[in-house]
Amino acid sequence: MARPDGRQPDQLRPVTLTRGWSTHPEGSVLVEFGATRVLCTASVTEGVPRWRRGSGLGWVTAEYAMLPRATNTRSDRESVKGRVGGRTHEISRLIGRSLRAAIDLKALGENSIVLDCDVLQADGGTRTAAITGAYVALHDAVSWLAARKALTGTPEKVMHRSVAAISVGVVAGEPRLDLCYDEDVAAEVDMNVVCTGAGDFVEVQGTGEAGVFARDQLDALLDLAVVGCLDLAEAQRKALSLL
């Protein structure tokens, strides 16, 4: 069965990383995976949370949110509802874990960086786009600290590896890379994979949405994801060379 947008099974959607999209944050990136668009900002604060003070270690955390009309119907703001949903918590924690894998917290020194990932438009893969864009925003925030001689280590030591993320799944019996929304809702197997720029795994989240899946399907999906993440790592390197 052909993909909705005519892509090959192993083909990413067009990926764009626009740095400096927002004026005020120390790092900001608008990341686009096809029609999915996420604004990632990195905000630097001197000092760390109370439980980390005196450790010599920095801290990186993340918050994820979706604008009310990011999808085809309006959803209420979670701030208005008075509570953050479980899905939002889970994605925020995933982004934070993923980005902490990219950074040496000792070399960062006792500084904190908060990554805010706001979905402007959703067409599948919002969390993977957020991780991919947040890495570039984090890199710019670290460079901002380096310019002010506020790091304990060198920028290269602080950002000692890159991370990116991509979705994969089985749709109509076929392993596919970077699912758009129409594919995501129809997937028999749905998976999100976070990889380093060297192709090592940071996190793998996979579910058999319509039953179970075999080991050979898992291997095929992981192979697809690694290739996709390596392509995204190259896109990150190109974006970081532009400013």
Image: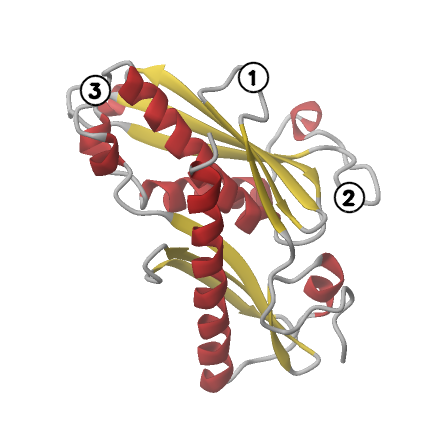
| Mark 1, secondary structure of its residue | loop
Q: CA distance from mark 1 to mark 2?
A: 26 Å
Residue 207 vertical position relative to residue 126 in the rendered view, above or below: below
Label 2 SS = loop
Viewer-side label of 3, 1:
1
Q: Tell me where residue 72 appears, x and y as whole percent.
A: 83, 45
Which residue is denoted by mark 3 in the rendering? 53
Asked whether, in this view, residue 170 is left or right of residue 222, the answer is right
Instruction: Choose mark 1 or mark 2, whichever is in front.
Output: 1
Which residue sits at x=24%, y=37%?
156
Q: How many numbered marks appear? A: 3
Q: Residues within 10 Å of mark 2 (few under 14, many from 20)?
A: some
Kind of residue sitting beneath label 2? Thr
- Disc 3/disc 1 C-alpha distance (Å): 30 Å
* Crowd tier of the residue under label 1, counting other residues whose Cα lies within 10 Å: few below 14, some 14–19, many 20 or above: few
Can residue 48 be seen by looking at this rendering? no
Query: Crowding near pointer 3: few (<14 within 10 Å), some, many (20+)?
Result: few
The numbered mark, 3 or 1, whose residue comes first in the sequence reads 1
Q: Nearer the viewer, residue 41 or 80?
A: 41
Q: Position of residue 4 (x, y in %)?
A: 78, 67
Q: Of marks 3 and 2, which one's residue comes earlier in the chain?
A: 3
Task: Classify residue 36 as left or right of residue 5.
Answer: left
- Residue 57 can be seen, yes or no: yes
**Where residue 56 appears, x then y in whole percent?**
16, 25
The amino acid at mark 1 is Thr
Label annotation for residue 71: 2
Point out residue 135 in the picture as x, y percentages from the top left corner: 43, 40
Q: Which residue is mark 1?
A: 23
Using the image, determine if residue 197 lies above or below residue 114.
below
Quadrant of the snapshot with the N terminus = bottom right
Residue 58 lies, with reference to residue 194, above or below; the image says above
Residue 170 horizontal side relative to residue 93, left or right:
right
